[in-house]
Image (spheres, rainbow, N blue to C red):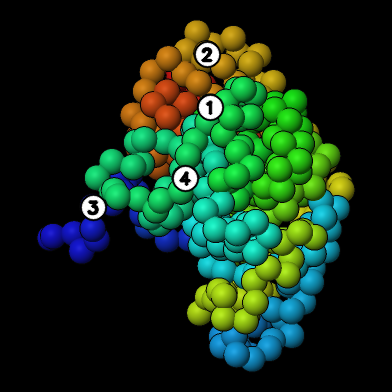
Amino acid sequence: MADVFMNTYHRLPVSFVRGEGAWLFDAGGKKYLDFSSGIAVNCLGHAYPPLVKAIADQAARLNHVCNYYQSDVARAFAEKLVAACAPVGMRRVFLANSGAEANEGAVKIARKYSLVKHGANRHRIVSLRGSFHGRTITALSATGQDVFHKDFGPFTEGFSYVPAGDMEALDRALDGDTVAGFLVEAVQGEGGVRALEPEYIERAARLCAERDILLLFDEIQCGLGRTGTFLACEAYKLKPDLVTLAKGLAGGIPVGAVLAGEKAADILQTGDHGSTFGGNVVAAAAGLVVLETVNRKPFLEEIVRKGEKLQSTVRGWKHPKVQEVRGRGLIIAVDIEEEAWPLLERAVTMAGAATPGLLMLSAGKNTLRILPPYIISDAELEQGLELLRGLLN
């Protein structure tokens, strides 16, 4: 039978029918331990009871309201999200559907800010080599990886890239006469789970402030508690001008957000931007559960502890195939001496229904990316790590 889907994904040979906590189950009843969280989306695992209830209750009342009108649940979600991001200076939010859409919104804000404050021809956005900001043409234009660019040009004009950590290249690139914004991930997820050095980010923030260039943090994968602070940029003790969020923001329901600080909060005016499904009430109800669950100090401390346990365990193996382990919180990379993708395939095709499968991600040719749900137990972490060691053996 011909496949009705376009050939956009290298799908692994498993189809899931239900999930529970950190586990997914296929039609035959075999279970798989989820070390991927749907690429950081299912941050509270699968079928998390408060999330299920909030979604069901909201859908039974109302599932969509056009943005011509107001919604109490969308307002409550927006207020709680802005409050959660207030420690880094955020004041207002625009709700969207996805990370790419959030990043495009941030680019529009940066360009309009620069146009209003400094005039035309100051519209360039600088990002980093190894970055990933989305798959739409403009988000792809901001992505600093050639592998994603092949076959899709010409791209949106006005984007350039610098190597992460190169202070001189950054100084040259952040030209106050031509640049509107600097777009950066605190931890590059698709780029191999690489955290930026504090000195580099501090230098970038200083240059942006001096030259009135907006500092944009893409926290789509590394935000929302994933690194052990609610926003990854909190670890750098600075206040960006814009922050973008998506993925885990509603625990599995599509949503994205652009948050703006003092400089950028009032830039967009009526008619400047929009999103048909942005601020959807079902997503907002789910998002409230995520914010109420994740943004608590004890919960975030547990993410840090679990991440440290995972990293120290893998390092403690001193396995000949493990070259490096790195990460923050529950976003972790394991560099291995073989190609990652065949190992991901073996992890879901282990023989026998009695042997659980293991779901992981790659981030480059030889890098395993591990993003467990926050609610994973210590016993489940240990079981997943034993499965991984067996695969490496």
Q: Is residue 279 left or right of residue 28?
A: right
Quarter in which the C terminus is drawn: top left
Residue that badge 2 annotates = 323
Disc 1 to disc 4, how far (Cα)? 14 Å
The reply to whether discs 1 and 4 touch (Cβ–Cβ < 8 Å) is: no
Disc 3 to disc 2, how far (Cα)? 33 Å
Badge 4 element: strand
- The image's mark for residue 159 is 4
Residue that badge 1 annotates = 163
Amino acid tagged 2: Gln
Badge 2 element: strand
Q: Is residue 381 above or below residue 82?
A: above
Disc 4 to disc 2, how far (Cα)? 34 Å
Which is nearer the eye, 324 or 321? 324
**Which is closer to the viewer, label 1 or label 3?**
1
Q: Is residue 6 above or below residue 30?
A: below
